[in-house]
Amino acid sequence: MVADDGVLAAQAQMGAGGMNVTYRSTRGRAPDVDFEGVLLSGLARDGGLYVPVKWPQFDGAAIRAMRGQSYERIACRVLEPFVGSGFDAAELGTLVESAYAGFASPERCPLAELDQGLFLLELHHGPTLAFKDFALSLVARMFNAVLASRGERVVILGATSGDTGSAAIDAFRGLPAVEVVILYPEGRVSEIQRRQMTTPEERNVHAVPVQGDFDVCQAIVKSLFNDLPFRDRHRLAAVNSINWARIVAQMAYYFAAVVRLDAFERKVSFVVPTGNFGDIYAGYAARQCGLPIEALHIATNRNDILCRVLATGSYCPDAVHATMSPSMDIQVSSNFERALFAACGEDGERVRGLMARLADGGFALDGAEVASLREDFQAGRCGEDETLSEIAGVWRERGVMLCPHSAVGVHVARRVAGDGPVVALATAHPAKFPEAVGAACGETPAIPDRLQTVLDRNERSVPCMAGLEDVRRFIEELKAQ
């Protein structure tokens, strides 16, 4: 793929032309790396998350030049300055085209108007019917290309509250350069989410149930990554949304939405159902690069720690409550560290100290830090009854079925004030949550063919793990085979 005028305009602003964007850790004690470094490592060696040292800039002319372009072309324009020399334009174009070829909608992420000025951005037309497909379908191909060129193999280790695991397993299954180990909380994902992880026949993918909630799974993953000898010995790599490549891939659909709405003079507000904070942080990143976004609204379910920290400045995790929107049942949102880094004036030592206090129960932000977060994000909460009511109302009035996560977003979006369009992200297909949707609508959603095959296949079971040492042994035994 040859860079067009929009890409060249963006490059000209950065003084780019094969330039490498450099990434640094939010905790300030790890070496800066290039795109291949953030792709293959995911988590910095000091435990921090990578962010760009300098944000690439897209001016109005570069964004307007995306009008009428396919989603793939828009994605390439957004990605090119971030990947630098990691992939040339032709290789990047091939990877992007391949990643989205299997999506059911030719628009990839169609926009539907629910009410006057309220739009639904449908992100569930990928292989596993969840927004995670936009990033992982591409990231898997990037991993494969880089590892093949190096002649290397890695172990992909991740935790999931439901959709990340199924998308990662689908994207990486059968790839020769990777083993995939995904931890999920036993009994806290939907049946379809579990079966999407446990029914693939490829032997390089492993879905591992863990006793506890998602935060337990996530803590195990972080502990193993922070054990640097273990990490190096087994060549661990991350594909959770802590991996910067996931974030930049998701930025593209924010650009696509603004372009399709032709919203250059009247800014768009986005409402994002939020668990691990990666999806809404992608919107923040897009705005940092010049995309005209009016406001970014966090939508939470009962597990509303992100609402609480914006209201009080106190980030103290509570018990994780099981809800009908399980992908949001999280109290420790990993990507929130990236937002903290900005709010703390990019002070890595301050972030390091806050994260240490989080391990001891929580921390409090100062007034300037809270004010900074409030400039970047707003937040709203939706309870279980409100979620059911929203699903039922949209079905009754518009004939559109929403998954519970998407319903949380729509509910919060209805309370957003502003002159411009409001876009709520529809993050998963309703058929992935048939019980909740059926209870609200009085009928269950039709099951797409790609989900039906999951229900028809046998599951491949792995014994439930009790904690960190069980998972450590599992990986060691896996590598010994």
Image (cartoon, helix red, strand yellow):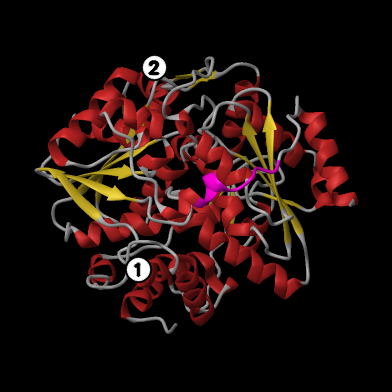
Badge 1: how crowded within 10 Å, few (<14), some, or many (20+)? Answer: many
Horizontal and vertical percent position of residue 308? 40, 19
Residue at 50% of width from left, 77% of height from top? 94
Instruction: Name the residue nearer the viewer: 233 or 398.
Output: 398
**Looking at the image, residue 133 lies above or below residue 475:** below
Q: Is residue 293 left or right of residue 314?
A: left
**Looking at the image, residue 148 lies above or below residue 444:** below
Horizontal and vertical percent position of residue 233? 86, 50
Amino acid, disc 2 = Thr
In the structure shown, which secondary structural element does the residue marked by tag 1 occupy? Answer: helix
Q: Is residue 145 left or right of residue 464?
A: left
Residue at 50% of width from left, 36% of height from top? 276
Spatial CA distance of label 1 from label 2 is 38 Å
**Looking at the image, residue 20 lies above or below residue 139:** below
Residue at 37% of width from left, 23% of height from top? 307
Q: Which mark is residue 312?
A: 2
